[in-house]
């Protein structure tokens, strides 16, 4: 089984938070008056665990993490008239990579919904040896919460068991 450091880090953070909550509850009930280096260590670990969980992207946006994808949906395709080609590194076990970029546009889209529109600037390609080449039209920029995002492409690698890895993003210099 592959060692996944993110899973173990999340588990350690949750254990740390549970320890600090347990100590706080016991102190509140008057069942302990823990002081000293052990209490300081538990408090420090709990705070660090909380910070880790609060700053982890997938804590706030869980839909960007791993997901199941039925293999019957994976039809190989690339957008017509693709002018940009980006090679990405993925899990060596991946069989496919699905990707999507905003529509081609010289200006700035006002929001992500109009930028991606019908998702026609997307595709599915075969991954081999931990590499896949994504082909698409130069994506346009779009605004999100007052910020203008540079052209980029999102992708997920798909493993043999149908699990798609977390969403990754690559900036593209094509304008």
Image (cartoon, rainbow, N blue to C red):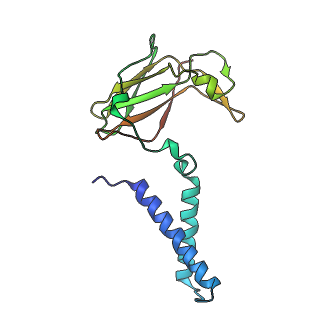
Q: Where in the figure is residue 169, as x and y percent of width and height?
A: 50, 34
**Quadrant of the drawing holding the C terminus:** top right
Residue located 56% across and 81% down the image:
39
Residue located 45% across and 65% down the image:
12
* Residue 175 horizontal side relative to residue 72, left or right: right
Q: Quadrant of residue 53?
A: bottom right
Q: Where in the figure is residue 63, as x and y percent of width and height?
A: 51, 43
Q: 35 or 114: nearer the eye?
A: 114
Residue located 38% across and 30% down the image:
97
* Residue 39 horizontal side relative to residue 110, left or right: left
**Quadrant of the drawing holding the N terminus:** bottom left
* Residue 167 horizontal side relative to residue 124, left or right: right
Q: Where in the figure is residue 32, as x and y percent of width and height?
A: 58, 89
Q: Quadrant of residue 40?
A: bottom right
Q: Where in the figure is residue 144, as x and y percent of width and height?
A: 67, 33
Residue lying at the far top in this picture: please name it. 81
Say if 142 sits above or below 49 in the image.
Answer: above
Residue located 59% across and 20% down the image:
140
Say if 169 sits above or below 50 in the image.
Answer: above
In this rendering, the count of numbered labels is: 0
């Amino acid at each position: 089984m592959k060692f996944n450091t993110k899973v173990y880090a999340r588990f350690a953070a949750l254990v740390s938070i549970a320890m600090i909550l347990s100590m706080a509850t016991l102190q509140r009930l008057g069942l302990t008056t823990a002081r000293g280096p052990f209490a300081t260590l538990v408090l420090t670990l709990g705070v660090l665990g909380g910070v880790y969980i609060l700053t982890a992207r997938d804590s706030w946006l869980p839909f960007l993490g791993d997901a199941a994808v039925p293999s019957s949906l994976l039809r190989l395709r690339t957008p017509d008239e693709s002018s940009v080609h980006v090679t990405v590194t993925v899990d060596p076990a991946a069989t496919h990579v699905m990707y999507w970029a905003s529509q081609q546009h010289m200006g700035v889209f006002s929001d992500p919904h109009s930028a991606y529109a019908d998702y026609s600037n997307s595709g599915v390609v075969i991954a081999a040896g931990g590499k896949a080449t994504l082909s698409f039209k130069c994506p346009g920029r779009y605004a999100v919460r007052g910020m203008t995002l540079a052209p980029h492409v999102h992708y997920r690698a798909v493993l043999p068991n149908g699990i798609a890895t977390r969403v990754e993003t690559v900036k593209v210099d094509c304008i």
